Amino acid sequence: DYTGAATMDVASTAAVCEVYNLVPGITYFYKVEADGVVVSGGRFHVVANQLRMIYAPSISNIRDIGGWTVQDGLRVRYGLIFRGGEVNGLHPSNPADLDVLKALGVGAEIDLRKDNNYDSGHGQVGTCAFGFPAADYFFREGGYDCKVEHLTDAASKKRYKEWFPFILSHLREGKAVYYHCVWGADRTGLVSVLLEGLLGFSQEQMNKEYELTSHSFAGL
Protein backbone atom coordinates (compact mmCIF):
# COMPACT_ATOMS: atom_id res chain seq x y z
CA ASP A 1 0.00 0.00 0.00
CA TYR A 2 1.65 3.23 -1.17
CA THR A 3 -0.95 5.54 0.35
CA GLY A 4 0.79 8.69 1.55
CA ALA A 5 4.07 7.76 -0.12
CA ALA A 6 6.43 10.47 -1.35
CA THR A 7 6.50 10.91 -5.12
CA MET A 8 9.21 12.13 -7.49
CA ASP A 9 9.16 13.08 -11.15
CA VAL A 10 12.00 11.39 -13.03
CA ALA A 11 12.95 11.93 -16.66
CA SER A 12 12.34 8.90 -18.83
CA THR A 13 15.97 9.03 -19.96
CA ALA A 14 17.40 9.07 -16.40
CA ALA A 15 19.67 6.15 -15.56
CA VAL A 16 19.92 7.08 -11.87
CA CYS A 17 17.44 8.54 -9.40
CA GLU A 18 18.95 10.22 -6.34
CA VAL A 19 16.88 10.12 -3.15
CA TYR A 20 18.04 12.10 -0.13
CA ASN A 21 17.49 12.19 3.63
CA LEU A 22 16.31 8.64 4.16
CA VAL A 23 16.49 7.12 7.64
CA PRO A 24 19.27 4.54 8.22
CA GLY A 25 18.08 1.14 9.36
CA ILE A 26 14.81 1.38 7.42
CA THR A 27 13.70 -0.74 4.45
CA TYR A 28 11.98 1.31 1.77
CA PHE A 29 9.63 0.10 -0.96
CA TYR A 30 9.30 1.80 -4.32
CA LYS A 31 7.52 1.54 -7.63
CA VAL A 32 8.06 3.28 -10.95
CA GLU A 33 5.10 4.37 -13.02
CA ALA A 34 4.88 5.66 -16.59
CA ASP A 35 1.54 6.99 -17.82
CA GLY A 36 -0.19 5.35 -14.85
CA VAL A 37 1.33 1.92 -15.52
CA VAL A 38 3.73 0.33 -13.00
CA VAL A 39 6.88 -0.58 -14.92
CA SER A 40 9.18 -1.47 -12.03
CA GLY A 41 9.28 -1.85 -8.25
CA GLY A 42 11.18 -3.31 -5.37
CA ARG A 43 12.76 -2.54 -2.05
CA PHE A 44 16.07 -1.36 -0.65
CA HIS A 45 17.55 -1.13 2.83
CA VAL A 46 19.47 1.87 4.17
CA VAL A 47 22.45 0.69 6.21
CA ALA A 48 22.14 1.52 9.91
CA ASN A 49 24.76 2.80 12.35
CA GLN A 50 25.75 5.51 9.91
CA LEU A 51 26.06 9.27 10.25
CA ARG A 52 23.00 10.99 8.86
CA MET A 53 23.88 14.19 7.06
CA ILE A 54 20.83 16.07 5.77
CA TYR A 55 20.79 17.36 2.21
CA ALA A 56 19.25 20.84 1.89
CA PRO A 57 21.79 22.84 -0.14
CA SER A 58 20.80 26.37 0.88
CA ILE A 59 21.14 25.55 4.60
CA SER A 60 24.56 24.99 6.08
CA ASN A 61 25.78 21.93 7.92
CA ILE A 62 22.60 20.01 8.82
CA ARG A 63 22.87 16.65 10.51
CA ASP A 64 20.90 14.29 12.71
CA ILE A 65 22.32 13.70 16.20
CA GLY A 66 20.99 10.14 16.05
CA GLY A 67 22.79 7.01 14.92
CA TRP A 68 25.66 6.92 17.39
CA THR A 69 26.11 3.86 19.60
CA VAL A 70 26.85 5.35 23.00
CA GLN A 71 28.58 4.14 26.14
CA ASP A 72 25.66 2.09 27.48
CA GLY A 73 25.54 0.11 24.22
CA LEU A 74 22.31 1.71 23.04
CA ARG A 75 21.98 3.68 19.83
CA VAL A 76 20.64 7.23 19.83
CA ARG A 77 17.43 7.34 17.82
CA TYR A 78 17.35 9.08 14.47
CA GLY A 79 14.93 11.85 13.64
CA LEU A 80 14.61 13.57 17.02
CA ILE A 81 17.31 16.24 17.24
CA PHE A 82 18.87 18.10 14.32
CA ARG A 83 21.65 20.68 14.30
CA GLY A 84 22.53 23.06 11.48
CA GLY A 85 22.80 26.59 10.16
CA GLU A 86 20.29 29.39 9.96
CA VAL A 87 17.31 29.24 7.64
CA ASN A 88 16.64 32.99 7.58
CA GLY A 89 18.65 36.14 8.26
CA LEU A 90 22.04 36.58 6.63
CA HIS A 91 21.71 33.31 4.67
CA PRO A 92 18.02 32.74 3.84
CA SER A 93 17.06 29.26 2.72
CA ASN A 94 14.97 28.49 -0.30
CA PRO A 95 11.42 27.25 0.41
CA ALA A 96 12.15 23.71 -0.77
CA ASP A 97 14.96 23.29 1.75
CA LEU A 98 12.85 24.68 4.57
CA ASP A 99 10.24 22.08 3.57
CA VAL A 100 12.93 19.40 3.91
CA LEU A 101 13.29 20.22 7.60
CA LYS A 102 9.55 20.30 8.11
CA ALA A 103 9.23 16.92 6.38
CA LEU A 104 11.79 15.53 8.84
CA GLY A 105 9.32 16.32 11.61
CA VAL A 106 10.96 19.48 12.92
CA GLY A 107 8.38 21.18 15.10
CA ALA A 108 10.50 23.35 17.39
CA GLU A 109 13.48 25.67 16.93
CA ILE A 110 16.27 26.95 19.17
CA ASP A 111 17.89 30.06 17.68
CA LEU A 112 21.32 30.84 19.15
CA ARG A 113 22.02 34.00 17.14
CA LYS A 114 22.60 37.48 18.45
CA ASP A 115 20.60 40.47 17.20
CA ASN A 116 23.41 41.58 14.91
CA ASN A 117 23.45 38.17 13.17
CA TYR A 118 20.25 39.05 11.34
CA ASP A 119 19.99 40.88 8.06
CA SER A 120 16.98 43.21 8.27
CA GLY A 121 16.41 42.74 4.55
CA HIS A 122 15.70 39.03 4.99
CA GLY A 123 14.28 38.45 8.45
CA GLN A 124 13.29 40.34 11.55
CA VAL A 125 15.31 39.85 14.72
CA GLY A 126 13.93 36.97 16.72
CA THR A 127 11.57 35.80 13.97
CA CYS A 128 10.93 32.09 13.50
CA ALA A 129 11.42 31.16 9.84
CA PHE A 130 9.30 28.04 10.33
CA GLY A 131 6.32 30.06 11.51
CA PHE A 132 6.12 28.14 14.79
CA PRO A 133 4.12 29.67 17.64
CA ALA A 134 6.06 31.25 20.50
CA ALA A 135 5.90 28.10 22.63
CA ASP A 136 7.74 26.15 19.92
CA TYR A 137 10.37 28.78 19.22
CA PHE A 138 13.21 29.57 21.62
CA PHE A 139 15.17 32.79 21.12
CA ARG A 140 17.41 34.31 23.76
CA GLU A 141 19.72 37.24 23.21
CA GLY A 142 23.12 35.95 24.17
CA GLY A 143 26.77 36.26 23.47
CA TYR A 144 29.18 34.06 21.62
CA ASP A 145 29.28 31.96 24.77
CA CYS A 146 30.89 28.90 23.23
CA LYS A 147 34.34 29.09 24.79
CA VAL A 148 35.78 27.21 27.75
CA GLU A 149 35.57 30.23 30.03
CA HIS A 150 31.83 30.48 29.46
CA LEU A 151 31.25 27.11 31.12
CA THR A 152 31.77 28.82 34.48
CA ASP A 153 30.06 32.11 33.58
CA ALA A 154 26.76 32.52 35.45
CA ALA A 155 24.84 34.17 32.58
CA SER A 156 26.02 31.57 30.07
CA LYS A 157 25.23 28.67 32.40
CA LYS A 158 21.72 30.04 32.88
CA ARG A 159 21.17 29.95 29.11
CA TYR A 160 22.60 26.44 28.89
CA LYS A 161 20.12 25.20 31.51
CA GLU A 162 17.18 26.63 29.57
CA TRP A 163 17.92 24.67 26.41
CA PHE A 164 17.37 21.17 27.71
CA PRO A 165 13.87 21.40 29.25
CA PHE A 166 12.78 23.02 25.97
CA ILE A 167 14.19 20.11 23.96
CA LEU A 168 12.73 17.43 26.22
CA SER A 169 9.27 18.97 26.39
CA HIS A 170 8.99 19.02 22.60
CA LEU A 171 10.35 15.52 22.15
CA ARG A 172 7.65 14.32 24.53
CA GLU A 173 5.11 15.99 22.24
CA GLY A 174 6.51 14.13 19.25
CA LYS A 175 8.22 17.17 17.74
CA ALA A 176 11.78 17.00 16.47
CA VAL A 177 13.95 19.94 17.52
CA TYR A 178 16.22 21.99 15.24
CA TYR A 179 18.89 24.14 16.90
CA HIS A 180 21.24 26.47 15.08
CA CYS A 181 23.36 29.61 15.08
CA VAL A 182 24.48 31.21 11.79
CA TRP A 183 26.65 28.45 10.34
CA GLY A 184 25.78 25.60 12.70
CA ALA A 185 29.36 25.44 13.91
CA ASP A 186 30.59 26.79 17.24
CA ARG A 187 27.54 27.88 19.23
CA THR A 188 25.58 25.01 17.77
CA GLY A 189 28.56 22.77 18.47
CA LEU A 190 28.53 23.72 22.15
CA VAL A 191 24.87 22.71 22.51
CA SER A 192 25.74 19.45 20.76
CA VAL A 193 28.66 18.66 23.05
CA LEU A 194 26.58 19.26 26.19
CA LEU A 195 23.64 17.28 24.80
CA GLU A 196 25.84 14.43 23.59
CA GLY A 197 27.47 14.20 27.00
CA LEU A 198 24.03 13.70 28.54
CA LEU A 199 23.25 11.05 25.93
CA GLY A 200 26.37 9.05 26.79
CA PHE A 201 28.69 9.92 23.91
CA SER A 202 32.37 9.25 24.53
CA GLN A 203 34.84 12.11 24.25
CA GLU A 204 36.12 10.63 20.98
CA GLN A 205 32.59 10.52 19.54
CA MET A 206 31.92 14.12 20.56
CA ASN A 207 35.17 15.19 18.90
CA LYS A 208 34.28 13.39 15.68
CA GLU A 209 30.76 14.77 15.58
CA TYR A 210 32.06 18.30 16.16
CA GLU A 211 34.64 18.00 13.39
CA LEU A 212 32.04 16.95 10.81
CA THR A 213 31.39 20.68 10.39
CA SER A 214 34.72 20.83 8.54
CA HIS A 215 33.11 18.84 5.72
CA SER A 216 30.35 21.43 5.21
CA PHE A 217 30.58 24.80 3.50
CA ALA A 218 30.60 26.27 7.02
CA GLY A 219 34.07 24.79 7.37
CA LEU A 220 35.48 26.33 4.19
Image: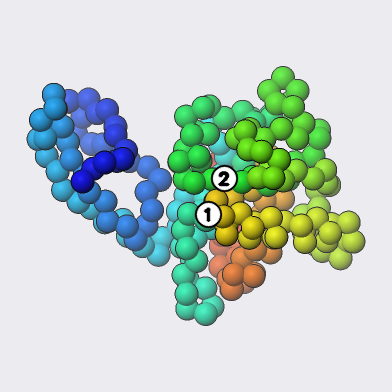
Q: Earlier in the sequence, mark 2 or mark 1?
A: 2
Who's the residue at 89% across and 61% down the image? Answer: 153
In-front residue for pair 75/36: 36
Alpha carbons under labels 2 and 1: distance apart = 8 Å
The residue labelled by disc 2 is: 107
User: Where 130 sits versus 108, above or below?
Assistant: above
Q: Look at the numbered disc 2 and give the secondary structure of its residue.
A: strand
Circle 2 packing at 10 Å, graded few (<14), some (14-19), many (20+), is many
Whether residue 212 appears in this view of the structure is no
Residue 34 picture location, percent across and down: 14, 27
Q: Which mark is residue 215?
A: none
Residue 114 picture location, percent across and down: 79, 39
The single residue placed furthest to the top in the displayed view is 121
Residue 106 picture location, percent across and down: 54, 45
Image quadrant occupied by the C terminus: top right
Marks 2 and 1 close (CB-CB < 8 Å)? yes
Who's the residue at 61% across and 54% down the image? Answer: 170
Residue 198 in the figure: left or right of residue 68: right
Amino acid bearing label 1: Gly
Residue 206 in the figure: left or right of residue 31: right
User: Where 29 sits versus 98, above or below?
Assistant: below
Residue 110 picture location, percent across and down: 68, 47
The residue labelled by disc 1 is: 174
Whether residue 157 appears in this view of the structure is yes
Question: Residue 192's image quarter?
Answer: bottom right
In-front residue for pair 126/133: 133
